[in-house]
């Protein structure tokens, strides 16, 4: 008789995502995952196949989580300026009860050069982020908040690069005030 799962897949995937986010792929062992997820090794293999497949699923979960939060912040804002500042604030402050920085940025730095699937997932996630930023910039250009000297897509690429840098710096001992100055300087390029 087949045994039923004794865990909720989304719950253990969330735990794996947090561990990979904190430690990265290579530093996280199967023993770490089994212990942190609170499931048996066999259950991990039966459900997720292997560590790499679990990692890729954790990346997808992270992208859904963060992409959704960026989009929600943009929708709640009354102006394009507020929308962008809210995203910068989220990147600087981080997510409550979560590791600092960004799992996607960390994964790109750690693995993208030698893992085509990780590279594709990070490239896709970064493109979605740039698309959202381009929408916000275009909104700001139409409302007169932002410069029209550059195309919205070009400005979005620049802003995404600044946000990626902030996500890296958020994992270091850099002072929050420094991150805030970088965010403010990044916003100045948008001044009409």
Image: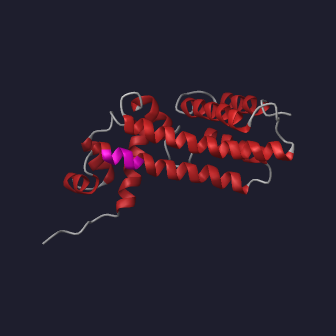
Residue sitting at 79 percent across and 34 percent down? 190
Task: Pick the quarter of the image with the C terminus.
Answer: top right
Q: Where 57 sits versus 192, above or below?
A: below
In the image, is residue 55 part of the stretch drawn in magenta? yes
Examine the structure image and report whether residue 102 is included in the region drawn in magenta.
Answer: no
Query: What is the x, y in percent for residue 136?
Result: 72, 46
Q: Is residue 47 left or right of residue 21?
A: left
What residue is drawn where x is 25% and y is 43%? 30
Q: Position of residue 168 (x, y in %)?
A: 54, 31
The region drawn magenta spans 53-58
What is the x, y in percent for residue 18?
Answer: 42, 46
- Closer to us: 130 or 180: 130
Q: Quadrant of the N terminus?
A: bottom left
Residue lying farthest to the left in this orientation: 1
Residue 179 placement, left or right of 46: right
Q: How many marks?
A: 0
Residue 143 % position (x, y)? 85, 47
Say above or below: 165 vs 138. Answer: above
Q: In the rendered image of this protein, does residue 111 appear above or below residue 50?
A: above
Q: Main secondary structure of the magenta part?
A: helix
Depth check: 14 or 162 in front?
162
């Amino acid at each position: 008789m087949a045994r039923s799962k004794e865990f909720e897949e989304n719950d253990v995937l969330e735990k794996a995502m947090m561990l990979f986010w904190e430690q990265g792929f290579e530093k996280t062992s199967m023993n770490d995952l089994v212990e942190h997820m609170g499931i048996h090794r066999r259950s991990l293999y039966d459900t997720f196949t292997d560590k790499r497949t679990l990692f890729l699923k954790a990346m997808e979960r992270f992208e859904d989580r963060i992409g959704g939060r960026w989009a929600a912040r943009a929708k709640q804002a009354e102006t394009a300026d507020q929308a962008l500042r809210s995203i910068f604030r989220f990147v600087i402050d981080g997510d409550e009860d979560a590791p600092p920085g960004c799992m996607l940025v960390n994964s790109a730095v750690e693995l993208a050069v030698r893992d085509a699937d990780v590279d594709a997932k990070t490239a896709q996630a970064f493109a979605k982020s740039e698309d959202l930023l381009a929408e916000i910039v275009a909104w700001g250009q139409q409302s007169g908040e932002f410069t029209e000297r550059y195309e919205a897509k070009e400005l979005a690429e620049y802003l995404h690069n600044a946000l990626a840098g902030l996500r890296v710096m958020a994992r270091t001992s850099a002072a929050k005030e420094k991150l805030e100055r970088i965010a403010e300087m990044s916003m100045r390029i948008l001044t009409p």
